[in-house]
Image (cartoon, rainbow, N blue to C red):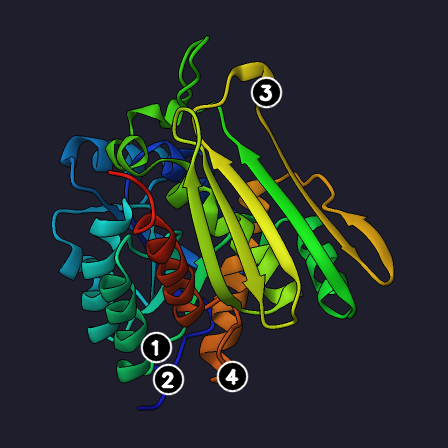
Amino acid sequence: MDTPRLPARPRVGLLGTGPWAHRTHAPALAAHAGSEFAGVWGRRPEAAAELADAYGVKVYEDPDALFADCDVVAFALPPDVQAPLAVRAAAAGRHLLLDKPVATTAEDARAVADAAARHGVASVVFLTLRFAEPAAGWVAEQAARSGWFTASAHWFGAVFPPDGAPSAYAASPWRKDKGGLWDVGPHALSVLIPVLGDVTSVTAARGPSDVVQLALRHTSGAASTAVLSLGAPAAAAGVGLELRGAEGVFSLPDWTDVPGAYGRALDALVTAARTGVADPRDAEFGARLTQILAQAEAQLPA
């Protein structure tokens, strides 16, 4: 099926009204010069009305009505709410700006990728490290190198710290239930895979709190590790990724301006929609990340 055409200024509708939508999605959509922020739908009507009013856009009582009015649908929803709505949006011919993880089951993530392909719509998954600068440029530079030996990644979030106030994202039931593996695991994999190659095997072990340790092998032959948590003590929180190979040791740089990164994700989606060339960070890639995380989760004690 041909990719649905986009107008000069595509209309973008937002699904979701939580802290991530307030801090990243809505301000980025409002600031984006190449599109029109058209409206908001949320599961809590009063929250949707509040967010829509803040940006002077339409509030929708029904997601299908938003699909009918928009060219692109941006998602700021829990993954298992996002997935079925993304399938519906694709069936309506709308391009998909997805959040990570696309879903928390391989079957649901596969349904999203298949729906995008079946209905000819473009898709991009907003993976922060793949769009925020200078991190995104650094990943591209490392992907052009060869001779990798190993890599180590860690993402220790203090969303649910044992020794202080929880973050603004602590009210998210799915994060509490699924932990760092699912919330920040996609970020680590989104860097390791384009540099070292797809994952050929994964072994997972549980640590304290919600800590999950992953040992990975890649198609390049390199090995990597990732340690993930949302329950780190505040003083222990931090993110890092180090690559080691024949050309030396390379460390992920700090990044800033997450709303700006979201704008670049929308740019990438618009480019994919207009050219018909799939973005490497599309729903198919999101489905692969979900498959790997599900394989890891299946190894953990209940």
Q: Residue furthest right?
A: 247
Q: Secondary structure at mark 2?
A: loop
At label 2, the amino acid type is: Thr
At label 3, the amino acid type is: Ala
Residue at image coords 74%, 60%: 149
Label number found at residue 262 = none
Circle 2 is placed at which residue position?
3
Image x and y of residue 236, in percent: 59, 20
- Give the camera-side residue of 108 and 127: 108
Alpha carbon of mark 3 to alpha carbon of mark 1: how far?
42 Å
Circle 3 is placed at which residue position?
236
Circle 4 is placed at which residue position?
275
- Give the camera-side residue of 252 and 92: 252
Decide: is 251 above or below 107.
above
Circle 1 is placed at which residue position?
121
Alpha carbon of mark 1 to alpha carbon of mark 4: how far?
11 Å
